[in-house]
Amino acid sequence: MRLDLPRLTQPVFPLLLLGLLALTGCDREPAASYPPAATPEALHAHGDEFAEDVIQVTDNIHVAIGFGIANSIMIEGDDGVIIVDTMESMEAGHRVAERFRAITDKPVKALIYTHSHPDHIFGAAAFVTPGTEVAVYAHDTLMQEADKIFSVLQPVITRRSMHMYGNLLEDAARSNVGIGPFVDAHSDSTVNMLRPTHTFRDTLEVEIAGVQLVLKHAPGETDDQILIWLPEQKVLLPGDNIYKAFPNLYTIRGTSYRDPKTWADSLDLMRSLGAEIMVPSHTRPIHGAENVDRLLTDYRDAIRYVFDQTLRMMNAGMTPDELAPRLRLPPHLAESPYLQFFYGKPEWAARMIYQGQLGWFDSNPSNLHPTPPDERARRLTALIGGQAALAEAIDEAEAAGDAQWVLELTDILLREAPTHEAGRAARIRALRALAESEINPNARHYYLTHAGELAGDFVVPDRIFTPDDAMLGSVPLSVYFDGLAVALDGEAAWDVHQKTVFDFTDLDQRYTLIVRRGVTEVVPGAVEDADIHVRVNSLRFQQLLAGLRNPAVALARDYEFVEGGRIGLARFLRLFNPDIEVE
């Protein structure tokens, strides 16, 4: 249902009025010259971009492509090397480091993280000889972003990432992930990020191993994104602000708001440098000042077009469901090989922009207090004529080849009747049919992984990477307590008011964790009236919270009780983890 907004009583802003009037033409047929849509075959061919290789970009710069989802870049200096981005796991990092060491045996003098995403930081220790200290450069907000993913949002981000990247699918079903061949993340993968030793806010000029570098804050795909500029060689390392696919202005694994306007501004900054070579952190390097400028300009223009046109339609009163399908790139941008929808999509970006600018409410009052999903499914099923009639409608949609409608109808049926086998089977077939026609690998993998879950082929885990002890110990204790805060079962703790002191014997640090009727508070130090007071080694505490230590064993062996006892602590921790047994 389209709800029209009241007309403006007077044109308070003429340009806005012109924008609203221009919308009258948005239903016209597409121009005859509009480029044909990419095909699933084009997605498979896109995999050639990620053939495993170490490419020599210039005399002293090499880039490793195809060893995981991201690239790792080595800059060779007089007496050492600089590694930019370090892959998503120690295993991937070791494979790249071995190839780099075959080129030069100069020691690693520094690591540079372009941003906080795991595929750029989690293999860091693989490049460094154990016991050796190296400088690690990053933006000063990187650890704040990395710690949020590591603790507060790890379960949901893991599940959604596994769907989006298709980690659990057979290799033949995955082909590539749009900006890399695969994500090197398995049940036995290990990670060890080295925390930054040198951070900056806006710009940092530094010489490392005789190489002049300029690091600049360039927010885009992340707020902590930086670019690296080698002025003497006119080489630009843009991080993840450009790659050979339409950008993930919104990623379906979930993310904080990515400001397209800011991203476009960062691309303008890059254009101003006059780079002759560009080495992205995904996909292959680009040579030639004209080629670099053209790609940066097209990328910038595509982002601004999506942002500006989304706001234009929002101002006309359109909802996300109305405006997203209308959004098409101009033909000259739609045909660019750097703007094919192999990673992001304009329609996903439009929905994010709407929510980022106006929040979740689409101005339809029906959505202020919508009927809960289970109740809505029950009522719709009854309205349609019952489960049998709904199942018949699903069969008709499937016979007509309308897989999307099958998916939406099975949303209703399987909420009302979760064990309806025919409905489940129809949903699986619809998901697989949609995947076969999908050019975007993120969407394709999401369809196939959801189908695999429904079919019982696998269970998508909450955790996949295993941090080693060194990485666990490097994370501040405050981050672990942040993780506990969002793990608390609030309703189960409505009647609980309890104070527990954790005395970390190896660090001479104490924290009091208070649960006060469903809410947590962490107080530095030990309060005198604690209900429970325990002494514990910080690593044992971190291993328990990371799921790497059996709770029963940990409570029996790791904790010394000053106040309270083991059963009381188990009951307290069970508020955060229901799997902890209380004897």
Image: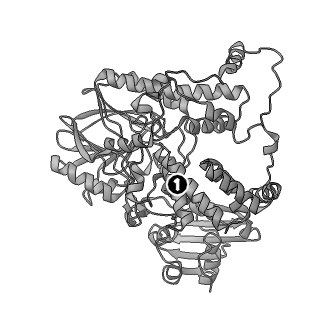
Left or right of residue 200, residue 484 in this image: right
Secondary structure under tag 1 reads helix
> Residue at horizontal 76%, vertical 67%?
494
Residue 423, position in %: x, y? 65, 62
Whether residue 261 is visible here, answered yes or no, is: yes
Q: Which image quarter is the N terminus in?
A: top right
User: Where residue 116 sits in the image (x, y, percent)?
Assistant: 44, 47
Residue tagged 1: 432
Could you tell me the amino acid type at mark 1? Arg
Query: Where 49 sits versus 451, above or below?
Result: above
Front residue of 138/45: it is 45
Question: Of residues 198 and 67, which is closer to you in this image?
Answer: 67
**In the picture, which quadrant includes the C terminus?**
bottom right
Toward the viewer: 536 or 101? Answer: 101
Residue 30, percent from left and from top? 57, 24
- Which class describes the residues within 10 Å of circle 1: few (<14), some (14-19), or many (20+)? many
Is 309 placed left or right of 232 in the picture?
right
Query: 236 above or below 399?
Result: above
Image quadrant in which you'd find residue 206: top left
